[in-house]
Image (cartoon, grey):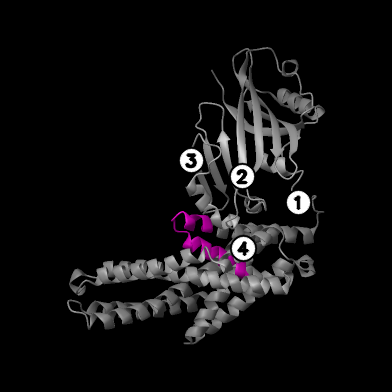
Amino acid sequence: MASSATATTTYLASSQARLPRWRDILPSGRHAEYPGTERHNIYLDTDEHDLRRWGCELRYRNPGTDDVAGWELVVPGDKLGTELHVASDDSNLVPDELTVAVAGLTGGRPLRRSVTLGIDEHRHEWYDRKDRLLARIGVETVQATVIGQVAVVDHWQQIHLEFGTAASKKHRTALTAALARAHAEPAPQRSELDRALAAVDSHSHPDAPSGKAVRARRVLGDYLDAQIEAIAAGDVWLRRGLDPIHPTRVAIRRLRSTLRTLQKAFEPTQRSWLDNELSWYAGLLGHVRDLQVQRARLAAALEDLPPELVMGPVAARIDTDLRADERRRLDEVLRTLDSDRYRTLLAALARWRIEPPLTEDADRPRVIEKAARRAERKADTRARAAAAGEDELALHRARKAAKRARYAVELATPLLGRNRAKRKIARYTDIQTVLGDHQDSAVATDLLREFGARAGTTPGENGFTFGLLYGLELRAADRARRRASDLTT
């Protein structure tokens, strides 16, 4: 039996809409009807709708089939997105691991039922006389109750249409036309929870008018949203005992870079405050990340040495000391997650995600493209100056400028075009990487000098290998400087 099908399209219709009589549209053949199944979802949030602000969903799901009932948490995020499933028969008790995971996003406020969904589904399959699949049609009747000071109840129908490979163009046209006559429209890309909250959601806005200025605002808003989303997802990872340090720092760097390259596009007081607070949090994460990078870097360098040049417990000293420092710095980060200052930062990011404080400058023609060009010119100037001299501070400033130019072009990609932007991003990534290698060597030499001095006064240890590694790092720094010069000529 051939039953392959194409992608599913979902249509929405009011609860009163009279749906088509499928048998009047599809040719005679085998028809399989599956009995209706009911499933129930209970969504939780704070009274302030904190999870909603972050685009997260925490729900109890009773699928009404052989699937296991239980709790689900969905946190959006590119690399740090989270989906947790905990089997449970108790819809009144949220598992501790989920409440802990969202504690930062909720600000510690209590979770309550916010929306309940009851979904009754009937599914049909239609086959032609050769028993080939024509269409698979699922009809769901949804009742949504939004719980607040006054409960709001809404009803609608969802039609999931999936054409089989045996469906002709005539069949496809007839079905879609019949749905249109029933005022069933293709569903926008949003969840059932979004649809339930649409009527009462204070953050819903009418469609914005088209135009270049509006498109620039949308591009800027999407980029800010992606970085804030990653920071929030990193918070969830930290509370779960996972390691999101590097991607969280990258998101903060991208966000701060945007605040600086487009300074006039944001209300100055709020922009300056957010930049300072992000710098503070990034500094805490940076202490952890620097130790992670150096531990891996020095371990790799030690691995490359001939065994006869490794004198004493060098590997153990490096690993033990850096792990201990990393653990201490990470504990500091974890304590910070429950501080008032950090909670204030997260609350501000949630507001920026919904409605960033943009000024009229955000509507100026080609504002994002012009900001990217300024960042590129600054990066090129600083890179050439740094490569021509011996100033360590100039190299550091050039690395930061290259990073900012890269992120500015990333932001402008939808406006510049992917191919053009890709070449620019690759160039500034190369400069950033080379100058980053130089910076890592500088940090490594400081650590190795300290390790060597300590080994010289510790029984059973020897400073020789640390001195050898120190010399290798000086050579690596010199190579990085020469490579940077090649990239800027």
Residue 138: in sight, yes or no? yes
Res. 449 image quadrant: bottom left
Q: Are marks 4 and 1 in contact (CB under 8 Å)?
A: no
Judging depth in this view, the residue of 274 and 365 nearest the camera is: 274
Closest to the observer, 387 or 24 = 24
**Left/right of residue 80 with respect to residue 346 in the rendered view:** left
Report the residue marked by disc 2: 44
Q: Position of residue 382 (x, y in %)?
A: 57, 81
Tell me the CA gap for discs 1 and 3: 31 Å
Residue 416, visible in the rendered structure = no
Specify which label sits upstream in the sequence, 2 or 1: 2
Residue at point 69%, 59% (across, down)? 221
Which of the two labelled residues, at mark 3 and mark 4, occupies the earlier sequence position?
Answer: 3
**Bounds of the magenta span?**
234-257
Mark 1 crowdedness (10 Å alpha carbons): few <14, some 14-19, many ≥20 = few
For badge 1, the amino acid type reads Ser
Q: Residue at (52%, 84%) from the top-left corner? A: 394
Q: Are marks 2 and 4 in contact (CB under 8 Å)?
A: no
Q: CA distance from mark 4 to mark 1?
A: 31 Å
Q: How many marks?
A: 4
Q: Report crowding for label 4: few under 14, some 14 to 19, many 20 or more residues within 10 A (C-alpha).
A: many
Element on which disc 4 rests: helix
Where's residue 115, x and y in %? 66, 40
Q: Are marks 3 and 2 in contact (CB under 8 Å)?
A: no
